[in-house]
Amino acid sequence: MSTTVENRGQFGSKIGFILSAAGSAVGLGNIWKFPGKAYNCGGGAFLIIYILMVVFIGTTVMLGEFVIGRKTQKNAIGAIRELNAKYSWIGGLGVLTGFIILCYYCQVGGWTIKYIVGYITEVSTIYADPMAYFLNNLLGADRFPVQGAIIYPLIFIFLTAFIISRGVAEGIEKMSKILMPLLFIVLIGLTIRSCTLPGADAGLAYMLHFDASTINANAFLVALGQAFFSLSLGMGVMITYASYLSKDENLVSNTGIVCFLDTCVALLAGFMIIPAVFATGIDPGMGGGFAFATLAGVFMSIPGGTIFGCLFYFLLFFAAVTSSTSILEGTVAFLVEEKGMERKKTVVVVSIVLFIIGIFYTLSQAHMNLKGIWISREGISYPIFGDFMEYLTDRLLLPLGALTTTIFAGWIWGTENAIKEATSDGKYKFALAPVWAFLLRIVAPIAIAIIIIAGMFLGMSIS
Ligand code: TRP
C-alpha cells in the first residue's frame, strides 16, 4: 500500500464536483456513440427506451455508487473492501472494464485531434467528400491506417497519461468550468442548424417517430449498455469521485443533475447528427463515422463554419480527455494502491499496452464489412477487436459491474445504511427513498440480470 489514501482533498464546491462527475460522464459516449445507437436501433422508440433506462436504472446505480464512495472516502476497491472485504473483486472487475474501454476510447479520442487539425489545414478536402476524408485518413481504406490507428491515438494517450502522471487533473477541472458549458452552447447552436438544413426533416421525423416494431430485446440491451457507458457507471468511477465529497452535499440532487446533464448532451447530439445524416445523405454506416463525417454538411452551411468545426472538435476532444483521464486514473490507482506499483512507471506501461491493443480497434473498424470473429488480410489474421471490445464492455462487464454494485449496496451493505448516507444522516429530505430502495434491491438487479443473460443469447450484434 502506498501513500495517497491519507491526506485526501475534498471538492471545495458543489459545482466542482458536478463538473468533474459530469466531465467524466459527458464524452465520446454521448456525442459519437449515442447517435449511432439511436440511428441503428430505430430512432424514436430507442430514445424512449434509453430515457427509461437512465431514469429507472441509471440514477439508481449512480446514487448507489455515490453513497458507497462518500461513506468510505476511499477509491472503488478500498471502499468496497472497507464495507465488506469479501467483495473487493468487484473493484477489480471495474479496473479490467476500464482498461478495455480505454483501448478503443483513446483511438477515437485521437480521431478528434485529427479533425481539429483537418478543419485548420485542409477543410476543402473535408468538404469535397466528407466520408472519403474520414475513411481515407482515419480508417485507412486500403492501406494500414497510420494516422487513425497510430499517430493521433498516440497523441491522445500521451496527453491522458501526462495528465494522470503529473496529477494535473485539477487544472483540467478548472478548464471544464468554461469549456463544458461552452460545449453545451455550441451543441445547441449546431443542433438548431442541423435540424433546419434542407432535408433534415426526414431525420427529425425518424428521431421523433415512435415505431413499435423497433422495440425488441436488442434495443433494451443496447440502451442499457449505452446508459451505463454514458453515465460512467459500472466500474467505480463515481465511487471514487464521491469519495471526495463532504457530508454537506446532497447526493440525491447531485445524482439528478449529473444524469440530467449527461442525457441532455446525448439527446442534443442525436438531434444534431441524425438530421444531418438525412440532410447530407452521408450514411456513416457502422464504421464509426458518426460525429465525424456527417457534421461536415452542417459546418459547410454556416458562415465561418471552419472555425465552428475547429471549435467543435476541440470541445469534443476536451470532453473525451475529461472522460479518459477518469478511467485511466481508476486503473492506475488500483495498480499503485493495491499492487504497490510505482505511479509513473504504471502509467507508462498501461499506456503502451492499451495503445497496442487499441490499434486493432481501428484496424477492425476499417474492415467492418467483413464478418466473423477473425479477419484475414495479407496473410495476417486478427480478431474483429472493435466489435468484441464494445460487446464485452457494454453488454457484459459494465452491466455486471452495475449489477454487483446494486446488490452490494442494496443487500449486503443494506438499504438502511445506504439511505442514511444518501440523506447525510437525515439532513436532507429524500421523499423517494422507499422507491429508490425498491429499485436498488429488486428492480435494477433483476432488470440488469435479465438483460445480461438475454445478451448472451442474442449474439454479437452491437448496433
Ligand atoms: N462516460 C464517458 C463517455 O460517455 C466514458 C466513461 C468515462 C466511462 N468513465 C467511464 C464509461 C466509466 C464507463 C465507466 O464518453
Image (tube, rainbow, N blue to C red):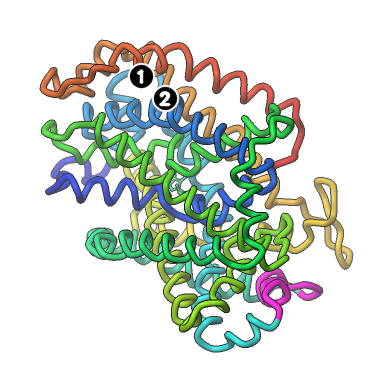
Residue with the mark numbered 2: 405
Q: Amino acid at mark 2?
A: Thr
In the image, which residues are magenta? 129-143
- The residue drawn where x is 63% and y is 76% is 147
Mark 1 crowd level (few <14, some 14–19, many ≥20, 10 Å Cα): many
- Tell me how far mark 1 sits from mark 2, CA to CA: 6 Å
- The residue drawn where x is 71% and y is 79% is 129
Residue 363 point in image, percent of width and height: 72, 62
Indicate left or right for 398 with 252 as reference.
right
Residue 53 in the image: above or below residue 284: above
Residue 54 in the image: above or below residue 355: above
Q: Place residue 255 in its image quadrant.
A: top left
Magenta span: predominant SS is helix
Residue with the mark numbered 1: 409
Marker count (numbered): 2
Q: Amino acid at mark 1?
A: Ala
- The residue drawn where x is 47% and y is 44% is 230
The answer to whether the residue labelled 1 contacts the one labelled 2, judged by CB atoms less than 8 Å apart, is yes
Quadrant that contains the N terminus: top left
Nearest to the observer: residue 365 or residue 87: 365
Indicate left or right for 252 with 319 as reference.
left
Residue 127 point in image, percent of width and height: 64, 81
Q: Is residue 459 visible?
A: yes
- The residue drawn where x is 42% and y is 65% is 189
